[in-house]
């Protein structure tokens, strides 16, 4: 084009004017092609691609291929999304997708029914502003989704739903929502039955135990009746202990509210537990104590004493005579920790997840011989839950077991407390 313009300019005696005219024509042509290309890009769903040659034709061809590929993937994604919506709509449980800010990205039909969500207005809103339950807000804030959360979203109604967080990606989360009203009602009936039955059994059992004790003190009682009478007393005492544990467990299950409590001198508590254990055990075991921190614990003294005492009693019951038991208290940046370590027979791995279930025993025969109720670890678990703590069990068959109670840092009392004389520090 420039050569043609130069030739024409040479013929008319104005070479540069000819070149400038040729460049202007070429620039106008390119501008027209660019305008057609832009118009096609803006309306490519309704217009055919422009008929251009050379480099513009190659560009149009490349863009057309990219557009067809994009349309193919778009249709594929739409089909997958429709299938996902149809499959999730048929799910019996609700699903809510949340972004890192806990804003609603998507939810299925069941979640909308259970939580009262509306598609046109609730997308992009924070889930906490729609489900206004304090326990749910704490559940999201805590970030520990290993266990679910049951709440009653409407005050005064029996309707109960369970939330289960499932993190994925970078801070995102699926929130599973399930209607557990029937299960919650059945559990409430079970708890009420156990509490009422235990309360009603306590009085007649106390009368029976009293008469058995009176009969045992009778000097005229025939010798052949004394062994069965002693066995009856032993079984009555065992039943009394079981009922006492059931009543305590029912009281703990009556509420899930966190305990505020008072400062507890853990070192003094462990010294008291060790002293009582040595007296009751009559020297059959070596009971050692290691207090590695002067910090105390904020909680309910009665509940903490019950939990620690249950762990120590279990260690004494299941550790053969001559074995060693160690009580340990220490603190770090993760909070306060109490552990009971024994040199007993240990527990096989398959039993560990079920140890805190009611009446679950690794060896039922040995537990009955030792007088255990099978409720001690269930009581410990509930006490720790009400203090924001957790129970961890580590055991190897033939090498003993370690039961550890872990409390959050907020439960620590940082002011030093007086330590008893028989408390020794570990380096």
Image (cartoon, grey):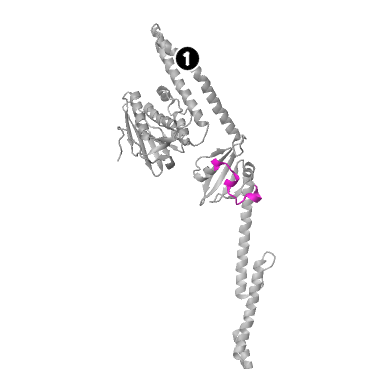
Residue range corresponding to the magenta coloring:
118-136
x and y, in percent, of residue 366 in the image: 41, 24
| Above-or-below relation of 223 to 155 | above
Left or right: where 122 falls relative to 392: right
| Whether residue 320 is visible | no
x and y, in percent, of residue 292 in the image: 33, 39
Is 419 contained in the magenta span?
no
Q: Nearer the viewer, residue 369 or 33?
A: 369
| Above-or-below relation of 340 to 145 | above
Left or right: where 412 falls relative to 117: left
Q: Secondary structure at mark 1?
A: helix
The C terminus: image quadrant? top left
The N terminus: image quadrant? bottom right
Instruction: Give the residue number, with chain letter if any, for mark 1.
Output: 208
x and y, in percent, of residue 195 in the image: 53, 25
| Above-or-below relation of 21 to 393 | below
């Amino acid at each position: 084009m420039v050569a043609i313009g130069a030739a024409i300019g040479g013929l008319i005696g104005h070479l540069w004017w000819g070149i400038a005219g040729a460049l202007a024509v070429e620039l106008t042509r390119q501008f027209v092609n660019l305008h057609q290309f832009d118009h096609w890009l803006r309306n490519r769903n309704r217009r055919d691609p422009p008929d251009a040659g050379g480099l513009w034709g190659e560009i149009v061809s490349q863009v057309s291929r990219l557009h067809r590929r994009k349309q193919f993937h778009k249709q594929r994604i739409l089909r997958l999304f429709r299938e996902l919506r149809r499959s999730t709509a048929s799910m019996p449980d609700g699903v809510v997708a949340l972004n890192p800010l806990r804003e609603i990205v998507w939810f299925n039909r069941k979640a909308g029914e259970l939580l009262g969500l509306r598609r046109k207005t609730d997308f992009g809103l924070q889930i906490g502003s729609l489900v206004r339950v304090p326990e749910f807000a704490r559940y999201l804030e805590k970030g520990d989704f290993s266990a679910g959360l049951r709440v009653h979203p409407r005050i005064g109604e029996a309707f109960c739903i369970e939330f289960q967080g499932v993190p994925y990606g970078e801070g995102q989360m699926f929130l599973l929502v399930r209607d557990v009203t029937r299960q919650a009602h059945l559990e409430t009936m079970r708890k009420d039955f156990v509490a009422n039955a235990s309360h009603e059994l306590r009085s007649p059992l106390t009368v029976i135990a009293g008469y058995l004790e009176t009969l045992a003190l009778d000097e005229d009682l025939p010798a052949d009746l004394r062994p069965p009478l002693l066995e009856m007393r032993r079984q009555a005492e065992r039943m009394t202990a079981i009922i006492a544990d059931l009543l305590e467990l029912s009281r703990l299950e009556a509420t899930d509210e966190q305990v505020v409590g008072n400062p507890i001198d853990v070192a003094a508590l462990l010294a008291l537990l060790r002293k009582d254990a040595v007296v009751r055990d009559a020297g059959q075991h070596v009971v050692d104590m290691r207090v590695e921190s002067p910090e105390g614990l904020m909680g309910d003294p009665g509940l903490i004493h019950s939990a620690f005492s249950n762990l120590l009693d279990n260690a004494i019951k299941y550790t053969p005579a001559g074995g060693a038991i160690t009580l340990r208290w220490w603190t770090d940046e993760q909070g306060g920790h109490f552990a009971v370590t024994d040199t007993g027979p240990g527990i096989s791995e398959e039993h560990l997840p079920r140890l805190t279930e009611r009446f679950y025993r690794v060896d039922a025969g040995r537990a009955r011989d030792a007088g255990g109720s099978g409720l001690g670890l269930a009581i410990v678990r509930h006490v720790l839950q009400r203090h924001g703590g957790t129970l961890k069990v580590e055991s190897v068959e033939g090498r003993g077991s370690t039961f550890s109670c872990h409390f959050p840092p907020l439960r620590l009392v940082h002011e030093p407390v007086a330590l008893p004389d028989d408390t020794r520090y570990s380096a």
